[in-house]
């Protein structure tokens, strides 16, 4: 019986190649989309799943509230771990780490590498996380300074097939370490994908600051394992007491310690994930999961529409089968077998398509999503079975219910009215989804343009950022670079105006209440910063070269004169109404608690991405922390100028890697996540629209085929080709307009929520919906018109001769 079902199903599919082709293409695209998204979601949900104690591991984070602003993060002061070991002696293990990105590793004078996954770790970390060591005693290695454990890939990169044990490396400029151990590569689905583990005691040599000061937070985090059978809620009150003990609670400013489950870190954007692995929003997974299912649903709608549209053709077949003894269940099985034939064939094509595009997806998403054949086949089989049932169940029961007397006695189409309403409703459903996605594409596109075009408060054209491995030799480098004809301006600083190179700290106002502080972003820059980046001075003056001499190390500490330049927001935070009123005020910055005088006020400029509001910002001249050179080029011969810059730079730093990036490109990199979302949304919207148009084209072909004689009569009576095309297209265009009315509030709500994540955003304007609606109407009209024009141009004699 089953063999007979499959044979008849195959014959029917071959008999109607257009309908079969539309269904196969739509289902293939839908299934492939769902499979890709399913593999992506599985990859994200598997982060840190391999750790034995994963359900008991927590990261200690901080939440600070100051002046109504809430700041959250997983980076904590370095002394926190020893303090918690004292106060929480019942916790089995507590460990602190320091993570580094873009660290220069010198293997030999001719072998330099840029490493972005370096973790300084205490030995207790090996008892918390599952780092599988191949050689060496991990705890002993991380207990001693200047020792390192490499993973296998890093060891091969540095030393090839040679045994790495006993080899020496230089990290940065001052820290030399000895390779004492080797470990397996950490799975990519990890929030600490360390390429090497360096003993934490080495930080004293590597880090320029005293790491045991509570006021410093710079890449350090604390991890802990809870005792078995205990919940984090049991420690909430003790953590509150610890926060009060170690973080002074001032008026308008509070600090709290919170416990983040290990599995939640990857889905906590508010806490920034980790330095090595940024977090993603869970909404991101939900949205793309729903979009993938919607694309598949659109393909299923095509199947249902095409099946019910051909109901009249199959009705007589049903009648004959029932007359000769076929039961309703047998007919349902027959029609379901056709649905499963199409779905099974589409699933095979979807599997092959997914396998082919997976490398492209990994490259675009910057992921390493594994394509496992067994897992993919199981997932696709489940999707295919559900799809076959969803696409074939209603048409099967609908066709199987036909009464043989009625379908064999009359030429009337069974269930004509109900089928028409069903088809119209399904077409509206398809285009509603497509229009929501299309509006999303338009809004994201406009927001990305807004990022690109918004005035950030400084110049970014023709400026190159070059990293500095150390602050020594800057005077000599500056003299050399300024002699290059293509260099217009040069400034040394901690980083560009908008960059991640800022210190988040606070300022204390003197002689006001010392407990009353204002949170600020501290930026370190030299006297040429204003001219290089085109900052606008509103009051007072900017730094001058003589100010650098006033804080030189040769001058006694008590005689050094530190100066500050602030922005407009800082003036407001100080309770002042005019920039001039800030001049001469004394403030004390959290970095080393340095007291200084405000000598100038600059116009607000963005120090971080447009996701965040402009903060109060303070600038100071501090040469020992200049890590970047901003070089404004003349608009000619960029290549030659960059080559000359590299040559001068190499003379000063021969054992360091030279890296130069144009500032405008670095600024665009701040929005890589949004750019990927935009590209994916375009792809999904395009797929949905293509599948919709395929279904509309097939449905229009069938409807026009059913109205061929009507068209012939109208032509005989004098109807024009344009009039017939308009008549045939009108019914379909009404459905697209109805879909636009439904999609508009849905799309507005969804995109308004998406835009709410940005402090600086566009408005969702009415013309976006009008433009998307007009485009959808045009595409639908062109899709239907192709079939309509062909029917309208047909000779009426051919369409009426059977009468």
Image (cartoon, helix red, strand yellow):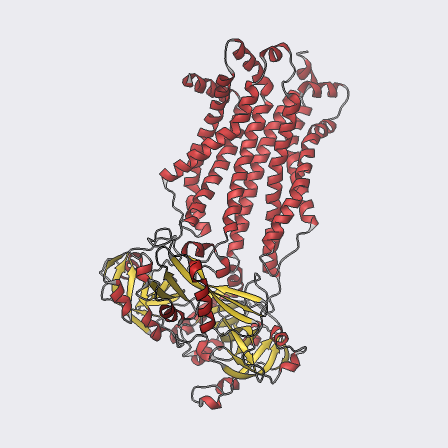
Q: State whether residue 290 appears in this view.
A: yes
- Horizontally, is 274 left or right of 393 in the view? left
Q: Quadrant of the N terminus?
A: top left
- Horizontally, is 233 left or right of 309 in the view? left
Q: Position of residue 156 (x, y in %)?
A: 28, 58
Looking at the rendered structure, the number of numbered marks drawn on it comes to 0
* 324 relative to 73, above or below: above
Image quarter for residue 85? bottom left
The furthest residue to the right = 718
Q: Position of residue 669 (x, y in %)?
A: 50, 59
Between residue 81 and residue 379, name the one nearer to us. 81
* 524 relative to 635, above or below: below
- Horizontally, is 516 left or right of 173 in the view? right
Q: Position of residue 410 (x, y in %)?
A: 64, 12
Between residue 301 and residue 660, name the one nearer to us. 301
Residue at the (58%, 77%) spot, across then down: 566
Q: Quadrant of the C terminus?
A: top right
Q: Position of residue 532 (x, y in %)?
A: 55, 74
Residue at the (47%, 23%) spot, across then down: 337
Q: State whether residue 627 appears in this view.
A: no
* 551 relative to 638, above or below: below
Residue at the (42%, 19%) spot, across then down: 2
């Amino acid at each position: 019986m089953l063999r007979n079902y499959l044979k008849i199903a195959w014959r029917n599919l071959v008999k109607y190649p257009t309908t079969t082709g539309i269904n196969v293409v739509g289902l293939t695209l839908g299934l492939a989309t769902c499979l890709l998204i399913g593999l992506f979601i599985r990859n994200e949900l598997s982060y840190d799943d391999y750790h034995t104690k994963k359900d008991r591991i927590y990261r200690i984070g901080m939440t600070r509230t100051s002046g109504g602003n809430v700041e959250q993060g997983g980076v904590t002061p370095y002394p926190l771990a020893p303090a918690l070991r004292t106060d929480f002696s019942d916790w089995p293990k507590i460990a602190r780490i320091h993570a580094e990105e873009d660290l220069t590793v010198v293997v030999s004078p001719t072998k330099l590498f840029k490493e972005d996954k370096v973790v300084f770790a205490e030995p207790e970390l090996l008892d918390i996380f599952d780092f599988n060591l191949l050689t060496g005693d991990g705890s002993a290695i991380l207990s001693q300074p200047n020792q390192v454990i490499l993973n296998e890939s890093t060891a091969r990169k540095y030393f090839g097939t040679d045994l790495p044990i006993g080899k020496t490396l230089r990290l940065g400029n001052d820290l030399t370490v000895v390779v004492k151990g080797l470990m397996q590569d950490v799975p990519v689905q990890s929030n600490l994908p360390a390429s090497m583990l360096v003993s934490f005691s080495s930080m004293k040599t590597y880090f320029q600051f005293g790491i045991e000061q509570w006021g410093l937070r710079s890449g350090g985090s604390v991890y802990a394992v809870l005792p078995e059978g205990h919940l984090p809620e049991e420690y909430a009150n003790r953590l509150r007491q610890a926060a009060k003990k170690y973080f002074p609670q001032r008026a308008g400013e509070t600090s709290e310690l919170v416990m983040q489950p290990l599995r939640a870190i990857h889905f906590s954007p508010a806490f920034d994930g980790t330095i090595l692995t940024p977090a993603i929003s869970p909404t991101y997974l939900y949205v793309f999961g729903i979009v993938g299912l919607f694309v598949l649903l659109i393909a299923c709608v095509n199947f249902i529409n095409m099946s019910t549209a051909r109901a009249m053709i199959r009705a007589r077949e049903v009648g004959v089968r029932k007359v000769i003894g076929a039961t309703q269940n047998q007919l349902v099985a027959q029609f379901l077998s056709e649905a499963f034939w199409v779905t099974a064939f589409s699933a095979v094509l979807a599997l092959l398509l997914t396998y082919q595009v997976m490398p492209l997806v990994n490259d675009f998403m910057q992921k390493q999503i594994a394509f496992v054949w067994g897992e993919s086949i199981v997932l696709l089989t489940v999707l295919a079975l559900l799809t076959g049932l969803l696409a074939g169940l209603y048409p099967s029961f609908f066709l199987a219910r036909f009464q043989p007397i009625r379908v064999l006695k009359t030429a009337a189409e069974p269930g004509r009215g109900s089928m028409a309403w069903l088809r119209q409703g399904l077409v509206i459903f398809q285009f509603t989804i497509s229009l929501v996605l299309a509006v999303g594409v338009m809004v994201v596109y406009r927001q990305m343009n807004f990022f690109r075009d918004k005035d950030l408060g400084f110049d970014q054209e023709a400026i190159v950022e070059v990293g500095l491995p150390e602050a020594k030799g800057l005077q000599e480098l500056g003299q050399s670079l300024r002699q290059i004809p293509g260099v217009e301006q040069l400034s040394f600083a901690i980083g560009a105006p908008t960059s991640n190179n800022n210190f988040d700290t606070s300022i204390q106002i003197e002689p006001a209440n010392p407990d009353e502080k204002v949170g600020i972003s501290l930026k370190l820059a030299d006297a040429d910063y204003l001219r290089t980046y085109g900052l606008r001075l509103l009051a007072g003056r900017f730094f001058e070269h003589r100010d650098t001499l006033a804080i030189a190390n040769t001058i006694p500490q008590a005689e050094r004169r530190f100066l500050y330049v602030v922005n407009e927001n800082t003036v407001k935070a100080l309770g002042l109404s005019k920039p001039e009123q800030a001049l001469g005020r004394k403030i004390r910055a959290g970095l080393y608690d340095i007291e200084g005088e405000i000598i100038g006020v600059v116009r607000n400029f963005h120090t971080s991405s447009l996701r965040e509001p402009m903060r109060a910002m303070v600038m100071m001249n501090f040469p020992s922390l200049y890590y970047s050179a901003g070089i404004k080029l003349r608009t000619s011969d960029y290549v030659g100028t960059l080559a000359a810059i590299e040559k001068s730079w190499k003379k000063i730093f021969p054992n360091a890697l030279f890296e130069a990036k144009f500032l405008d490109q670095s600024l665009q990199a701040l929005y890589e996540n949004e750019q990927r979302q935009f590209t994916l949304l375009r792809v999904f919207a395009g797929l949905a629209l293509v599948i919709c148009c395929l279904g509309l084209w097939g449905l229009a072909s069938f409807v026009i085929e059913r109205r061929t004689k009507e068209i012939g009569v109208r032509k005989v009576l004098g109807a024009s080709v344009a009039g017939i095309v308009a008549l045939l297209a009108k019914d379909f265009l009404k459905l697209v307009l109805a879909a636009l009315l439904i999609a508009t509030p849905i799309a507005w709500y969804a995109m308004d929520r998406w835009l709410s994540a940005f402090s600086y955003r566009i408005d969702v304007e009415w013309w976006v919906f009008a433009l998307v609606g007009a485009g959808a109407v045009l595409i639908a009209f062109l899709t239907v018109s192709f079939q309509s024009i062909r029917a309208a141009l047909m000779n009426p004699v051919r369409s009426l001769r059977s009468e």
